[in-house]
Image (spheres, rainbow, N blue to C red):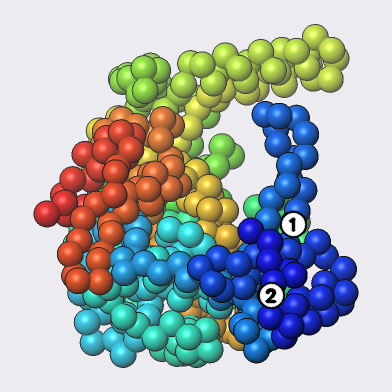
């Protein structure tokens, strides 16, 4: 109720002074013998379709005329909510590297950066706040100050040769590796690693060359390195082979990496290799006689094999590709861009694809192993975008190398998620990003008392948890 006239003079003076100064629709009310100051506002009532009066408490005035502003409500909770599903999944998938890096002085910070990179790529200054949302931050408590993380990246790059001992431990003895390389555009003017070179899109840019080797067996990256942007594919492979010359491994490579000198070096080092040949290679016979066939992804493939001075040459012909190439040339003949002589010279090689290898295997096995490499390459290209590592503003060679080591660890996590999807025939139906995002909805509430429990879990998340039941503890 309004008590302006009966209010003490000191209260009345303060009220009138504030009303004059603020020019607001101030109202003075007495409640329980105390004087309160309200402001009247017009609020639109949707149901009544007209403005209605609403008063909002500003504060109180004591009998001496002292105005006390209303204290804001404190929203306080004794509990914390953590992202649990995605946190536990990536933490468990990082355990192999966490164990291998047992003696590394910055193991916790490196793994924390990799986990954040795998879940939600962001700049160093935001890594700490993102990591604190994860349930694993209750047990893993690294110093994630941005300046400290930047220094650690430099330390990792400075000691990069030491990482090759880790890479060796990740490789299966006698196993085959997919070898891939990519160009990362750099916008730093002071980065020595960044040199002019042609990227896969044939653009001449300032770039850094990053190479990655994947295990054929596990589909997971097992080694990486960073080179100057001008280093060519074959040259980088040579450096890579030199580092593992005493390790019993082999490489499945892309067509552009074939070189007789590289193959001879691998034969000398007794390293296995599966390399596609260019169509004009002298190792490919002019008239291929196919003597067998198999089915790959519901497509029939003709095949044959012959010996050569550099190993076994496996030859394949895909009838569908042959038909497409034949139709294309005949269209050119019909439009007078080509003549029939051109067609006759090439008709026996249409749809033909050749691979050279030291391995004495069936043509279907060699073909399948190479095609698996293409699948990994496609996903690798996609994930580069997901991890936002297609360009870098880092201005220090060592920090760039350290940064891409973190990307390497993040890729290991994401490719292991991908392998689960592949094993359940879910590729193309679910993505790694979708898995990580949906699992972020699986939350764990921790009370101040120490009691813990799960928040309500959406049905879709429950199905995803079933896929990774051995990696997301539910005890």
Q: Quadrant of the C terminus?
A: bottom left
The single residue placed furthest to the front in the displayed view is 6
Helix, strand or loop at mark 1: strand
Point out residue 446 in the picture as x, y percentages from the top left corner.
26, 64
Dot 2 alpha-carbon crowd within 10 angstroms: few under 14, some 14 to 19, many 20 or more:
some
According to the image, label 1 marks what residue? 40
Q: How many marks?
A: 2
**Quadrant in which residue 462 is drawn:** top left
Front residue of this view, candidates 143 and 357: 143
**Residue at 61% of width from left, 82% of height from top?**
62
Answer above or below: position of 438 versus 229.
above
- Whichever of callouts 2 and 1 sits on the residue coming sooner in the sequence is 2
What residue is pinned by disc 2?
7
Distance of label 2 from label 1 (alpha carbons): 20 Å
Residue 102, given in percent of the width and then of the height, sits at: 22, 82
**Residue at x 27% of width, y 35% of height:** 463
- Expressed as whole percent of the image width and height from the top left, the position of residue 390 reads 61, 61
Residue 385 is labelled as none
Residue 319, percent across and down?
48, 16
Q: Residue at (29%, 44%) from the top-left corner?
A: 456
Report the front residue among 204 and 467. 467
Numbered disc in front, either 2 or 1:
2
């Amino acid at each position: 109720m309004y008590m302006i006239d009966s209010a003490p003079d000191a209260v009345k003076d303060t009220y009138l002074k504030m009303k004059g100064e603020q020019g607001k629709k101030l109202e003075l009310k007495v409640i329980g013998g105390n004087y309160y100051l309200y402001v009247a506002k017009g609020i639109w009532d949707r149901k009544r379709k007209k403005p209605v009066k609403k008063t909002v408490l500003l504060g109180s005035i004591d009998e001496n005329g002292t105005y006390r502003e209303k204290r804001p409500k404190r929203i306080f909770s004794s509990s914390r909510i953590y992202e649990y599903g995605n946190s536990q999944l990536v933490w468990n998938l990082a355990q192999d590297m966490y164990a291998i890096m047992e003696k590394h002085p910055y193991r916790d910070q490196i793994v924390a950066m990799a986990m954040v990179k795998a879940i939600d790529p962001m700049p160093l200054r935001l890594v700490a706040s993102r990591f604190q949302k994860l349930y694993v931050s209750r047990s893993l408590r690294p110093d994630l100050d941005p300046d400290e993380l930047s220094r650690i990246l430099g330390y990792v790059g400075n000691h990069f040769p030491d990482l090759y001992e880790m890479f060796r431990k990740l490789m299966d003895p006698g196993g085959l590796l997919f070898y891939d390389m990519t160009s990362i555009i750099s916008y730093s003017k002071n980065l020595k690693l960044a040199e002019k070179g042609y990227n896969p899109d044939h653009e001449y840019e300032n770039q850094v060359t990053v190479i990655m080797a994947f295990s054929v067996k596990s589909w997971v990256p097992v080694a990486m390195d960073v080179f100057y942007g001008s280093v060519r594919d074959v040259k980088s492979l040579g450096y890579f082979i030199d580092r593992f010359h005493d390790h019993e491994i082999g490489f499945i490579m892309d067509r552009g990496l074939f070189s007789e000198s590289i193959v001879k070096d691998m034969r000398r080092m007794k390293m296995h290799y599966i390399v596609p040949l260019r169509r004009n290679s002298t190792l490919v016979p002019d008239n291929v006689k196919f003597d067998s066939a198999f089915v790959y992804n519901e497509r029939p493939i003709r095949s044959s094999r012959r010996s050569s001075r550099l190993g076994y040459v496996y030859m394949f012909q895909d009838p569908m590709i042959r038909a497409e190439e034949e139709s294309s040339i005949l269209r050119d003949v019909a439009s007078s861009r080509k003549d029939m002589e051109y067609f006759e010279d090439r008709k026996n090689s249409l749809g033909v694809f050749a691979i050279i290898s030291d391995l004495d295997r069936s043509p279907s096995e060699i073909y399948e192993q190479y095609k698996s490499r293409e699948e990994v390459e496609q996903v690798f290209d996609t994930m580069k975008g997901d991890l936002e590592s297609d360009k870098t503003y880092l201005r220090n060679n060592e920090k760039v190398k350290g940064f891409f080591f973190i990307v390497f660890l993040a890729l290991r996590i994401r490719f292991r998620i991908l392998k689960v999807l592949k094993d359940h025939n879910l590729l193309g139906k679910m993505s790694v990003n979708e898995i990580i995002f949906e699992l972020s909805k699986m939350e764990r509430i921790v009370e101040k008392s120490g009691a813990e429990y799960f928040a309500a879990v959406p049905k879709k998340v429950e199905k995803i948890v079933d896929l990774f039941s051995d990696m997301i503890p539910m005890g």
